[in-house]
């Protein structure tokens, strides 16, 4: 297990634009493995590389309750979005808080997998929200920038 430190809001790295991955290296493979470990340990549904201090265009998600559907996206491109969903959103980099965010209901995304093979996926609901949230991290955007109303503590 490789658990990395999760950067939190206020850390400047979260506001930077990440760079495309040009080749798969052992170091990047280890990063991806550690990102899954770190996301699962923190009980999150997604984690982007800048959140662990690495400015590479990589994020991982697993939106299942039983943690059975890990997905990695490298150099992702949002091809198309459709519809709208309004719901509660949080972020491991803004611990203990949530806010209401409206995002598309459906997203078509193209990316590379851990073997640098291209794939295209259409995702809906929570997975769509998650992909869009994580993709924002690669451009230095946090969900709090898009929050409707206040960002509140999880107890509220
Ligand atoms: Ni986040």
Image (cartoon, rainbow, N blue to C red):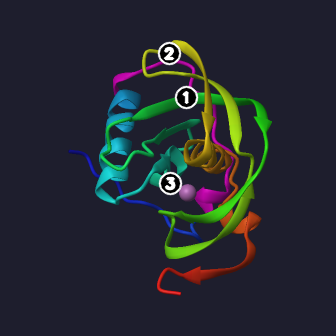
Residue under the image location 25 percent in, 46 percent down = 2
> Ligand 1: does it lie within 8 Å of the C-beta at label 2?
no
Which residue is more in the foreground, 42 or 80? 80
Q: Secondary structure at mark 1?
A: strand
- Residue to which mark 1 is pinned: 74
- Residue to which mark 3 is pinned: 51
Which stretch appears magenta? Answer: 12-26
Instruction: In the rendered structure, find residue 19 and report the number of the disc placed on it.
Output: none
- Residue to which mark 2 is pinned: 116
Residue under the image location 59 percent in, 36 percent down = 57
Q: Is residue 129 above or below residue 76?
A: below
Q: Secondary structure at mark 3?
A: helix
> Is the residue under label 3 in contact with that under label 2 (CB below 8 Å)?
no
Tell me if residue 17 is in the magenta stretch. Answer: yes
Across and down, in percent, residue 3 comes to 28, 52
Residue 40 is left or right of residue 54, and the answer is: left
Q: Residue furthest top?
A: 117
> Is the residue under label 2 in contact with that under label 1 (CB below 8 Å)?
yes
How many C-alpha atoms fall within 10 Å of the one at disc 3: few (<14), some, or many (≥20)?
A: many
Q: Secondary structure at mark 2?
A: loop
Displayed quadrant of residue 26: top left
> Ligand 1: does it lie within 8 Å of the C-beta at label 3?
yes
How far apart are labels 1 and 2 at the CA level? 8 Å
């Amino acid at each position: 297990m490789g658990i990395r430190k999760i950067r939190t809001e206020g850390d400047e790295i979260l506001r930077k634009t990440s760079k495309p991955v040009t080749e798969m290296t052992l170091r990047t493979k280890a990063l991806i493995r550690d990102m899954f470990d770190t996301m699962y340990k923190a009980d999150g549904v997604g984690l982007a590389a800048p959140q662990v201090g690495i400015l590479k265009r990589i994020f991982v998600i697993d939106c299942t309750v039983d943690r059975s559907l890990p997905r990695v996206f490298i150099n992702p491109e949002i091809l198309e979005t459709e519809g709208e969903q309004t719901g509660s959103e949080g972020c491991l980099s803004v611990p203990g808080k949530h806010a209401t965010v409206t995002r598309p209901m459906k997203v078509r995304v193209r990316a590379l997998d851990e073997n640098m093979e291209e794939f295209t996926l259409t995702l809906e609901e929570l997975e769509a929200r998650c992909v869009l949230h994580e993709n924002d991290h690669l451009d230095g955007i946090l969900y709090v920038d898009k929050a409707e109303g206040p960002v509140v503590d999880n107890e509220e």
